[in-house]
Amino acid sequence: MLEKTARELPQKEAIILGSRRVSYQELDETSNRVANALMGLGMKRGDHIAILQSDSPEWLTGYFGITKAGGVVVVLNSRLKASELNFLLRDSDSKILITEKTFSQVLSSILPTMPFLKHTIEVDGDVYKETVGNSSSASPVVEIKDEDEATIIYVAGMSGKPKGVVHTHASITSAFPTVSEGLEQKEEDIIINPIPLSSALSLIVATQASFMKGSTLVIVPRFTPRAILETVEKKRGTILYGVPAMHNALATLDEEILARYDLSSLKMAVTAGAKSIPDLLKRFEDKLSLTLCEMYGLTEYFIISMGTLRNRKLGTAGKPIGDVKIIDDSEKEVPQGMVGKVIAKGPYMMKGYYKMPQVTAQVIKDGYFHTGNSARIDEDGYLSIVEEESLTIVTSAGINISATEVENVLLEHPSIAEAALVGIPNRLKGQIPTAFIVLKEGKGATERDIRSFCRQRLADFKLPRRINFVDNLPKTGSGEIDRKQIREKQRR
C-alpha cells in the first residue's frame, strides 16, 4: 500500500510534525532502510519487534520498516511504567525494541533482566543513524501473505492481565477503503490527528487509511484546544480526528476564542473510542461549521458501524458495516429497537489474542466476534451504544482501563483491606475512574499516600481520579463486590 502511494505521489507530503515534512518517497525509502537494517541485525520473518516511542515520523518509519521485513509490530503505549512494560515485552516475546532516549530511565531497571531481547535501538542515537543511514533504500525481498500476522496491540483485560490483539495484513488493510469511502477522503485532504499512534483508531483508521489515499497526516503530539486550532489554521486541515473528550473541549470554547482562528478549511471531524453526547456534538458541528461522523469499533474489530459523510445521525455510531447482529443472553437476535449484545462478522476482525486461545474462543464463536458491548439499532437502522456497568472502564478519551488491574495494585498497599474501581458517569468526562477503599483495622492511609503508591506502579491514565474511603463495600449474593450498586449510589 505504501509503495503504491509512493510510486504515484513521490513528492507529496505524507507526514507533517511541526516544521518537519516527510514525503511519501522519503517515508517509503527510509522504512526500507529500517527493514534492511533490522534484517542485518538478524531479524527473521515473523519475529516480534516492539516500538516504544513518542509520536513522530520515526515511529511510522519503524512501523513500516518492521512490516516490510516481515516482522510483527508490537505496539507499546508510551505512557506505561516499568512494571507494565516489563510484562508486555515478556508476554509479546519481542526480540528487538525500537525506542528513544526519553525512555532510557524507565527501561533501565528491566532491560538487564531480558536476555530474549537481543537488541534495543534508540532512534535518536548514533548507532541507529549510522546503521539505518548505511542500509539500502531498496525494498527488501520478503514474501508476505495476507494471512501473515502484522501487528499486536495490547488492550485491558477483565482479569487485570493485558491481552495482545493480533491482526493480520488482511484485517488491517480491509479497513482502509471502508473508512476513506465513507468519509469521501481525497488525496488533497489534510488530516489533523491528535490521537496517539499506539491507538488502533489512530494507527489503522486515521493514519494508514490516509496513506492509502495519498492524503497528508499532521501529527499533533499533545492535545490542547489551542494546539488543534493553531494546527488547523496553519496547515489548512480538512479532516479532524478525535475522541469525545477532545471534541467536547472544542465544543465548549467561547465563540470569541474560535473567531481568532481561520478554520474555514475544516470540513469534517471524526469521533470514536467512547460514547458521545448528542447536544455537545451538535454544538461542536455548529461552532466549527463542519460535519461530524461517528464510528464504533474496537481494537479487536476495527469498524462495526460508521456514520458517513452522507449518511449519519448524531448521537448514534452510524449504521452497521457488514454482518452485525444484536443478540440476547441465549444468543438469539433481538427485535429492532431492543437492547442486546453486539456481535459482528467481517474482514476487520482480529486473528485472536496472543497466546490466549481459551480467551479467544470465548469471544470468537461461529465466526462472529462477541464485543460484550450493549447496543440497540433504531427504526432507521442506526446503532447506539448503551452504557452499562463493566469491569472495563471507558473514559471520554476513549481509553480502556481494567478495573481488576487497578484493584490488584491497590490491594498490594499494606493498609488496604478491600478495593473497588468503578467508572462513575460524568457528562463531559465520560466514566471517571473512582476508587472505593476499605482500610484494614488499625491502619491508616491518605489519598496522597495511595496516589503515590499507585503512580509508581501504574501508567498515569490508569490512576484513580477520585478516592473514597468507606467502611464497607456492598456484596452480591455470591460474595463478590457489587460494582453496580456502588455506581447507582453515586448517581443519586
Image (cartoon, helix red, strand yellow):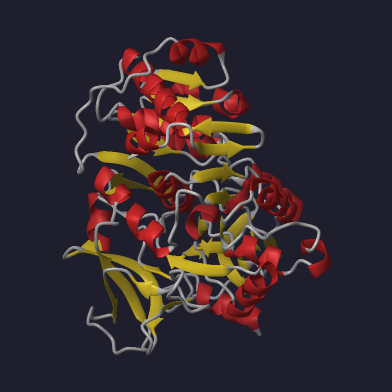
Residue furthest to the left in view is: 366
In the rendered image, residue 246, in percent from the top left (x then y), is placed at 63, 60
Q: Residue at x 23, y 50 (%)?
A: 357
> Is 127 positioned to the left or the right of 50 in the image?
right
Residue furthest to the right in view is: 256
- Residue 446 appearing in the image: no
> Is 452 positioned to the left or the right of 155 in the image?
right
Q: Which of the two residues, 297 or 369, is positioned nearer the viewer here? A: 297
- Residue 145 appearing in the image: yes
In the rendered image, residue 218, in percent from the top left (x then y), is placed at 57, 44
Q: Is residue 13 above or below residue 475?
A: above
Q: Residue at x 62, y 27 (%)?
A: 102
Q: Which of the two residues, 485 or 37, is positioned nearer the viewer here? A: 37
Quadrant for residue 88, please give it.
top left
In the rendered image, residue 72, in percent from the top left (x then y), is placed at 32, 34
Q: Is residue 13 above or below residue 248?
A: above
Quadrant of the rendering where the C terminus is positioned: bottom right
> Is 487 positioned to the left or the right of 40 in the image?
right
Quadrant for residue 159, please give it.
bottom left
Q: Which of the two residues, 435 or 260, is positioned nearer the viewer here? A: 260
Q: Residue at x 56, y 62 (%)?
A: 269
Q: Which of the two residues, 122 or 10, is positioned nearer the viewer here? A: 10
In the rendered image, residue 9, in percent from the top left (x then y), is placed at 42, 36
